[in-house]
Image (spheres, grey):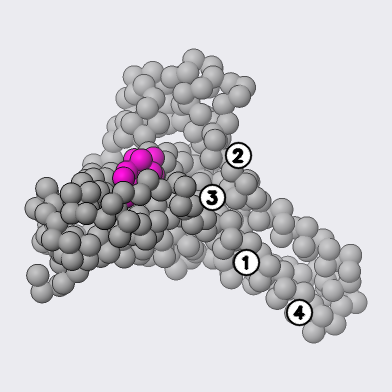
Amino acid sequence: MPANIKIFSGLLALIALFSGWSFIQTILNANDVSLSSGNQISLNYSKDNDNDGLTNQEESYWNTDMENPDTDGDGFIDGEEVASGHNPLVAGPHDLLIEFGKEKIASNLTEKLSALITSGLYAGDLGPSASYEAYSSAIDKISLSTLYDGIATLTPDELKASEIQEVEDVKRFQEIYLQKVAIIIEKDILPELFTEPFEAKRLLAKFGTTDGNNDINVFFLSRAARNEKIIKKLMVLDVPRGLVDFHKKTIAFFQSLNYQYQSISQTEKDPIKALVALNNLQDTYLQSRVILSDLAVAVKRLEIKIESKEFESLILQLYDPSF
């Protein structure tokens, strides 16, 4: 087999390793979603009053003016700024979103992969004279190295003790904490998780087009902005000592979602990381059930009453399906 064909087929195999195709297919084939009560969720996508590329709902994530296409008045409309990783509330030139300054998000897997392939070519392992064994070994090492880098860059660090405001593990503090967490999850995250696959389906159908890629960037960056707000709400809570592990797991869930969202939004700059993130997003979504189940366990064990009876019933059904 000619060397260029071998390298091309090897790269296809590498891309296949990271492919989120099964997840994409799941989204594209999704037609409806229903709650345990059997009620269908109807989708009414928000309008874009000022035609700036951000829906009214997305404007609320960014705190931008839904009647003004250029909230910060710097000559770039809000949707264009978000899609290109700029803050629509801050006039340029120093308006890059803070998230992209973080070391993990800034790490470019596609550039690392290119460097590894170049090294392999110079070393001869991917060159015309390379044996099949040397070539296969090099591809395996490159694949594993890129995979490990992808896992590392998309996995949040565990919270330090100094970042958690611990309080006594008494009933009064337990009730306040769990009530606030329940409100955050019910109001800020559950509605989005139910409707998100439908919006993703609509956007992925346009993937590869200029407008489609911009819409994808805006969609996932807006979700990241929402998650930043949720994380900030959680970080200021007083956490009873007996619920610290649950608190860490909950924040890690939202941080993980953030990493996936931000990485998928950067498809053009780092397609390899975007594919890894898209594949990981399915598993991250599934973690939401674990968080809800853990919340139900804590509510049941500590005999805490949740203000929303509908939400309390939902999480207790996860804890015990016969409930």
Task: Out of 162 and 181, give the one closest to the viewer.
Answer: 162
Q: Secondary structure at mark 2?
A: helix
Residue annotated with mark 1: 148
Task: Out of 290 and 56, give the one closest to the viewer.
Answer: 290
Q: Residue at x 22, y 66 (%)?
A: 297
Q: Position of residue 229 (x, y in %)?
A: 37, 38
Q: Secondary structure at mark 3?
A: helix
Q: Residue at x 16, y 64 (%)?
A: 300
Please report whichever mark, 4 or 2, sits nearer to the chain's N-terminal start: 2
Q: Amino acid at mark 4?
A: Ser
Q: Check residue 82 for magenta coloring.
A: no
Residue annotated with mark 2: 101
Kindly identify which numbered label has been placed on residue 263.
Answer: 3
Q: CA distance from mark 4 to mark 2?
A: 35 Å
Q: Are marks 4 and 2 in contact (CB under 8 Å)?
A: no
Q: Amino acid at mark 3?
A: Ser
Q: Residues within 10 Å of mark 4 (few under 14, many from 20)?
A: some
